[in-house]
Amino acid sequence: ERAPKLADIHPPSSVRQVSDLVDVVSRNVSVTNDGQSYTIHIGYSSAAPDLAATIANLYAQAYIANQLGSKAEAAERASAWLSERLVELRRDLEASATAVQNYRHAADILQSKQGTVTAQQLSAINNKLVEARGERVEAESRLATLRLLASRGGDVEALSEVMSSPVIQSL
């Protein structure tokens, strides 16, 4: 009996023929894996080498198309989920920014280029404190000098005139 050639095969015309064809192909196809890699081996047994190669190649193409379709569907689902998540995160960010702004307003923390109003006020108070401490040290120094002079019997009024002199103060 002569082996059928690919050109001799005609599409089945009835459900019975389709069923018989599926049975024949299923019996003659083999798909294996070596268990050590992701490589699969597809083979088809037939007396017609052209037919065997064509069916094995069609199986391989169908498998690849199926895998690509599955991966594309998974990528689409992931993309849709990420898009939804991005919308949620953007909404949360806006809510957080609004909450921060509301807190700043409620706590009277106004922001400017130089920092918050509270920080500016604190800086001004610190500057005044530094000035006051300097003035206190200067006054304590004068007092100590006057006490020393008074304890030695010196002229306190003369020292007072010297200390108030513009020339001495500029030094």
Image (tube, grey):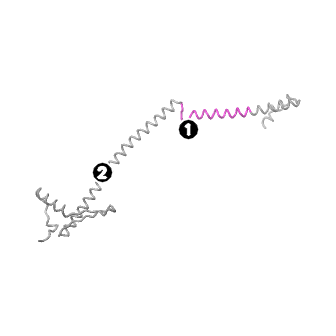
Residue 47, given in percent of the width and then of the height, sits at 17, 70
Amino acid under disc 2: Glu
Amino acid under disc 1: Lys
In the rendered structure, does residue 126 fall within the stretch colored magenta? Answer: yes
What secondary structure is marked by label 1? loop
Instruction: Tell me the chief SS of the magenta region.
Output: helix
In the rendered structure, does residue 130 fall within the stretch colored magenta? Answer: yes
Q: Which residues are magenta?
A: 108-136
User: In the drawing, does residue 108 fall left or right of residue 146?
Assistant: left
Q: Quadrant of the N terminus?
A: bottom left
Residue 154: name its quadrant. top right
* The furthest residue to the top: 157
Q: Residue at x 29, y 53 (%)?
A: 70
The residue at which mark 2 appears reads as 73
Q: Residue at x 56, y 35 (%)?
A: 116
What secondary structure is marked by label 2? helix
User: In the drawing, does residue 135 fall left or right of residue 98?
Assistant: right
Residue 104, given in percent of the width and then of the height, sits at 51, 33
**Which is closer to the viewer, label 2 or label 1?**
2
The residue at which mark 1 appears reads as 113
Q: Distance from label 2 to label 1 (Cα)?
A: 50 Å
User: In the drawing, does residue 168 fall left or right of residue 111?
Assistant: right
User: In the drawing, does residue 56 fall left or right of residue 146?
Assistant: left
